[in-house]
Amino acid sequence: MTRQTNNNGNYVRLPALRCLMYEVALNGWRVLRETVNDFSLWRLIEYPWATRVLALHRGDLVLDIGSGTSSYPHMLAKEGVDVIIAELDADRVRWQLAKRQETARPGDGVFLPLVADATKLPIRSDSVQRIAAISSLEHIPDDAAAGREIGRVLAPQGLAALTIPFTSTERESFFKGIRNFKKVDRNAFVQEGKAGSFFRFYTRDDIEQVYVQPARATLANWGGFGRRLLNWSYHETKLTRYWRRYVIKDWLLATVVHPLEERFDQSDPLYVMFTLEKRSS
Ligand SMILES: C[S@@+](CC[C@H](N)C(=O)[O-])C[C@H]1O[C@@H](n2cnc3c(N)ncnc32)[C@H](O)[C@@H]1O
């Protein structure tokens, strides 16, 4: 899985509009009205960011952890990148396989969906140059084990692009008055009546302990999204019922409002995005 490429330029890029077009090509026009997977505003921020910071070329290989029914691995494959999916839910892996069979074209990268637990990856140590985990690690109760596994399988000088929920203080609630999330641990919540709906926020110290140190990594490319405007005036409010609808609006929010919010708003972001680069020894 350690593949060297000789491409110096020609990085794979997935700007928000290209992601939107892929999403329509993969899942049909109806996704502009109501998404069929987790595609939404946040993904239009995360996918372009992850693709850029991973500095990918055609022929590179990405391990995508907790893919769910996301189109991101398909977008990468369409750009000629090889992808391994490690997803716990067998139904979602079947969905990914069926989607791949429907949409594969000559010239695409290799696409290998695996039913696999991020806390016990069936992958050799030090073997993966590029890892993506997009809004998935916060759903894993034993995140320390997932952090160790990312550190174990990442090759020396390899890069992992992670996006996870953030808080600088202790969170007492999530989606208060909108959905019933019960606090189960420090900064951790479970949605009542919904099995497997674990959700955790991370402080900067948590990130250091759970992800940076076990990988013996350098943290870089730090960014955030979902501050006062996009989170507290929109996502964590009753307006969230429009969250998964009319995805077309999200293109403007992601490309115009999000950069302005990042430039001028110092409040906590809902999510942070960062890379781990594993040190050589
Ligand atoms: C919010 S969803 C996926 C988001 C997706 N990455 C995207 O880009 O839209 C989180 C996924 O993580 C998966 N997951 C939860 N625990 C896991 C584990 N231990 N190992 C692998 N996947 C896991 C869930 O089954 C779910 O499909």
Image (tube, grey):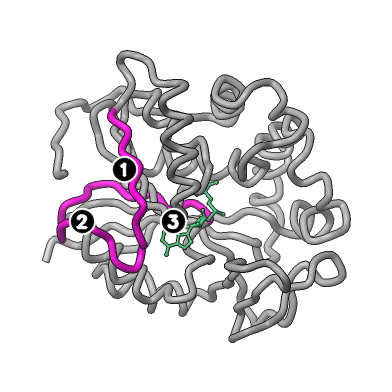
- The amino acid type found where label 3 is placed reads Leu
- Marks 1/3: CA distance? 16 Å
Q: Name the residue under label 2.
A: 123
- Residue 85 found in image quarter: top left
- The amino acid type found where label 1 is placed reads Ile
Task: Give left or right: position of 44 versus 244.
Answer: left
Residue 96: image x %, image y %? 45, 38
- Residue 6 found in image quarter: top left
Local SS, label 2: loop
Q: Tell me where the magenta segment starts and ends, as one range.
A: 110-135
Q: Name the residue under label 1.
A: 84
Residue 277: image x %, image y %? 28, 57
Earlier in the chain: of badge 2 and badge 3, it is: 2
Marks 2 & 3, CB-CB < 8 Å contact: no
* Identity of the residue drawn at 66% across and 35% down: 255
- Marks 2/3: CA distance? 19 Å
| Residue ranking furthest to the bottom | 185
Against 24, residue 2 (above or below) is below
Q: Nearer the viewer, mark 1 or mark 3?
A: 1
Residue 153: image x %, image y %? 22, 59
* Identity of the residue drawn at 54% across and 59% down: 272
Q: How crowded is mark 2: few (under 14 residues within 10 Å), some or many (20 or more)?
A: some
- Marks 1/2: CA distance? 10 Å
Marks 1 & 2, CB-CB < 8 Å contact: yes
Image mark for residue 162 = 3
| 22 drawn magenta | no
